[in-house]
């Protein structure tokens, strides 16, 4: 009975949620933090340099420029479909690295700040997992010999 209900529900929802617009919107939402972050850094490069210095990433200006380029390029690759799996794996690895650099909740004293950092840490793990699923999906299509989006 539960399987019948699930099958019925899946048949009803599949046309909307397996459409190309739905996929693009999902990918855009997934990349939104990287698009927003890189554009903010680009338009306020001084703040981007200060952020790199805060996290001990030197030399700060070239690191900030590299992060801006990396986040924009990978996001655009994911949205366009060009080597999407490579860009998704790269942004996933970048997200993991940045998470362990910026959200070291285990070093914080108990309290609201630690709670917020802990939540953000695990949210970022979720983002990395989503990028892994994007790469898995694209590579799965290649493995099956399916072209296109």
Image: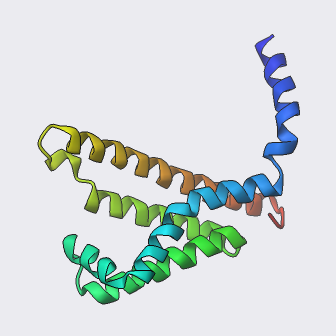
* Rendering coords of residue 1 (x, y %): 81, 10
- Where residue 47 sits, quadrant-wise, is bottom left
Q: Is residue 148 left or right of residue 92?
A: right
- Residue that appears at 21% across and 77% down: 53
- From this viewpoint, is residue 144 visible? yes
- The image shows a total of numbered marks equal to 0
Q: Is residue 89 left or right of residue 113?
A: right
Q: Is residue 105 left or right of residue 65?
A: left
* Rendering coords of residue 149 (x, y %): 80, 63
- From this viewpoint, is residue 140 visible? no
- Residue that appears at 34% across and 42% down: 119
Residue sitting at the far front:
44
Depth check, front residue: 5 or 31: 31
- Where residue 61 sits, quadrant-wise, is bottom left
Residue sitting at the far left:
109
- Where residue 29 sits, quadrant-wise, is bottom right
Please determine whether, in this image, residue 50 is positioned above or below residue 89: below
Q: Is residue 24 left or right of residue 28?
A: right
- Residue that appears at 83% across and 51% down: 19
* Rendering coords of residue 127 (x, y %): 49, 52
């Amino acid at each position: 009975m539960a399987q019948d209900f699930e099958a019925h529900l899946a048949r009803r929802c599949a046309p909307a949620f397996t459409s190309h617009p739905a996929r693009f919107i999902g990918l855009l939402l997934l990349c939104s933090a990287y698009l927003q972050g890189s554009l903010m850094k680009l338009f306020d490069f001084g703040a981007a340099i200060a952020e790199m210095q805060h996290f001990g990433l030197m030399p700060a200006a070239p690191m900030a420029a590299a992060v801006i380029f990396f986040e924009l390029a990978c996001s655009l690759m994911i949205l366009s479909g060009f080597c999407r799996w490579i860009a998704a794996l790269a942004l996933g690895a970048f997200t993991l690295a940045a998470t362990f650099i910026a959200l070291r909740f285990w070093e914080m004293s108990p309290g609201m700040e630690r709670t917020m950092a802990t939540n953000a840490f695990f949210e970022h793990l979720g983002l990395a997992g989503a990028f892994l699923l994007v790469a898995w999906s694209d590579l799965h299509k290649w493995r099956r010999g399916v072209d296109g989006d």
